[in-house]
Amino acid sequence: MPTNEFHPPRWRVRSPADFGRAIAGARRSRGWTQERLAQELGIKRSYLSELEAGASTLALERTLQALRRLGADVNVTLRDEDGPPR
């Protein structure tokens, strides 16, 4: 029997490129432009574009590597703005 449950968008993050796809996907799910998100974050749109393209930083690479080595799964789940995952 089909259900009407909503399953929130979810991204598995194993690399900076995955992280970038999660940011872009979450932004698009909200219907936001890069310009709007950049303004909300107080960063330049060009920097957000680099993040969404998977630009790597050593800190992010090492963090993901440490979590993988420890056997952790890193997932990004889109939440309602003021509530639990939708």
Image (spheres, grey):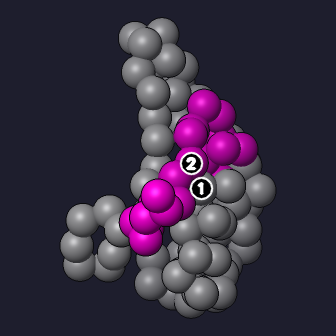
Distance from the alpha carbon under mark 1 to that under mark 2:
6 Å
Q: Position of residue 9 (x, y in %)?
A: 53, 60
Q: Which residue is mark 2?
A: 11
Element at label 1: helix
Principal secondary structure, stretch drawn in magenta: loop
**Magenta segment boundaries in residue numbering:** 1-20
Crowd around label 2: few <14 · some 14–19 · many ≥20 (10 Å): some
Q: Position of residue 55 (x, y in %)?
A: 72, 48
In the rendered structure, does residue 16 fall within the stretch colored magenta? yes
Quadrant of the frame with the C terminus = bottom left
Image quarter of residue 71: top left
Element at label 2: strand
Residue sticking out furthest to the front: 1
Instruction: Tell me, for residue 75, which label it has, or none.
Output: none
Q: Position of residue 1 (x, y in %)?
A: 47, 58
Query: Is residue 25 at least partly visible in the picture?
Result: yes
Instruction: Tell me, for residue 22, which label it has, or none.
Output: 1
Q: Which residue shows up at 51% across the image and 28% down it?
A: 64
Q: Of tags 1 and 2, which is closer to the observer?
A: 2
* Location of residue 52 with respect to 61 vertically, above or below: below
Residue type, mark 2 in image: Trp
Residue sticking out furthest to the right: 53
Left or right of 80? Residue 43 is right
Q: Which residue shows up at 23% across the image and 78% down it?
A: 82
- Is the Cβ of the residue at disc 1 closer than 8 Å to that at disc 2? yes
